[in-house]
Image (cartoon, helix red, strand yellow):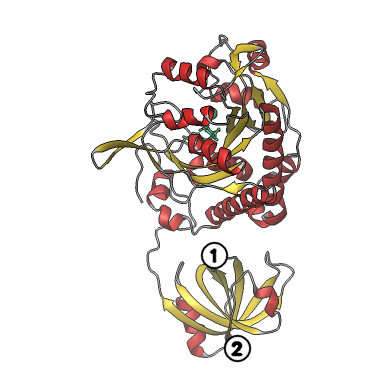
Amino acid sequence: MKKSTIREVSRYAGESVTIGCWLNNKRSSGKIQFLQLRDGTGYIQAVVVKSEVSEEVWEAARSLTQESSLYVTGTIREEARSQSGYEMTVEKLEIIQLTSDYPITPKEHGVDFLMDHRHLWIRSPRQRAILVIRAEIIRAVQQYFDEKGFQLVDPPILTPSSCEGTTNLFHTKYFDEDAFLTQSGQLYMEAAAMALGRVYSFGPTFRAEKSKTRRHLIEFWMIEPEMAFTDHEESLTVQEEFVSHIVQSVLRNCRQELETLGRDISKLEQIQAPFPRITYDEAIDFLHEKGFDLPWGEDFGAPHETAIAESYNKPVFITHYPTSIKAFYMKPDPNRPEVVLCADMIAPEGYGEIIGGSQRIDDPELMEERFKEHELSKEAYQWYLDLRRYGSVPHSGFGLGLERTVAWICGLEHVRETIPFPRLLYRLYP
Ligand code: 4AD
Ligand code: MG
């Protein structure tokens, strides 16, 4: 008996194979039953013909309920009308478990109900498509950096100090000391870049954000490259190439999943480097023209980002933000120290900021000044200052938020569907 997954059935056209699967749906027309089967790798229709199977097999097929688990054996046939291109003619059927009262039925359910049943909801075709695309994005990320000679480095999760400000830190005890869950691996990646040149990390990050928006998760995954001997402009070139590579990989390898989601593929096809760039000043002028009342020096919110993004069919970089609203480590523009050499990449179609990045301060004196201004303890950041004291070099890096990237590429309303088990304000179950 040959075993196959649904994904691999094309190898077995004309042969009999066994597939371990679940019943997704079924319909019947008297003497024929059509079983819609899923095994996680794909979907296939299995046809049970009464006159061609034993009474036992016929009855077993009749008894199947949604999400019952089974082994089905039959001959694989090419079938142009099916999504996978193949169908199975059933010969044998072995039920593993008959399911009753599966909570998620094909009818509509509310968001809270689905979130309470997230452990089952991920079996649905839409949720599966999203998780497959998420996995493809991660593959594309690793492929991009591996091919460009970056080394993968893993920064710690438990940290003694903050990277992105102290307002949204997750506190925990570390024996007798205080510790925090990491908000960003960046500071450690800077140390790694001084050791290995070009590095990237991929890991979970945590922010105790009290905001309940469709773009914020409490636990999210970030990809953080850091590059020695690289200035702000060079970093932007890497970012646009990198994001184009991700989108083009998904287009190449996840057509069916994008179709399942009903994504407008033509919008993604336009995502090719280079991406447009505007300065913070230009963005402020543009927003004033659009009727927004936002003084110079204030940060943009989601409505501002969306208004700016609407002018472009590609992601747009907003560069040179005011120094006062950005992180302590960003390098001031030498010609204009009131702004920093930084950029946020804003996705098109209203998906918001997907990348935050900058050139880093490399001067030890200026770094010490910043510690004072931001009231960061010199002792806690001594190691970070060392990077500026021993062979300091110009360097830049950025962080791509995985879930916002998934939301954009999949065309999703809310980031809660972009991660298998979302951690949201007021939601820690399941
Ligand atoms: O702009 P952020 O805060 O930048 C950093 O953390 C830098 N230290 C990164 C670096 O230069 N190495 O976060 C980077 C990205 C954002 O652009 C966004 O895509 C995502 O992380 N992000 C979130 N995604 C989901 N939920 C949240 N609460 C997020 N906060 C940030
Ligand atoms: Mg940011």
Q: Which numbered circle lies on residue 288?
A: none
| Disc 1, SS | loop
User: Where is residue 282, by image quadrant?
Assistant: top right
Q: Which numbered circle lies on residue 51?
A: 2
Camera-side residue of 42 and 294: 294
Q: Earlier in the sequence, mark 2 or mark 1?
A: 1
User: Where is residue 190, by image quadrant?
Assistant: top right
| Image position, residue 392 (x, y; %) | 58, 29
**Does label 1 point to a residue whose CB lies under 8 Å from ligand 1?**
no
Camera-side residue of 309 and 368: 368
Q: Say which amino acid is labelled 2.
A: Ser
| Disc 2, SS | helix
Query: In the displayed structure, does residue 82 sit left or right of residue 220?
Result: right
Q: Which residue is mark 1?
A: 40
| Image position, residue 43 (x, y; %) | 60, 66
| Image position, residue 5 (x, y; %) | 59, 73
Query: In the displayed structure, does residue 251 sit left or right of residue 93?
Result: right
Marks counted in the figure total 2
Query: In the displayed structure, does residue 120 sit left or right of residue 52?
Result: left
User: Where is residue 3, by image quadrant?
Assistant: bottom right
Q: Say which amino acid is labelled 1.
A: Gly
Residue 401 in sight here: no
Which residue corresponds to the image point at 69% horizontal and 21% vertical from the top-left?
A: 278
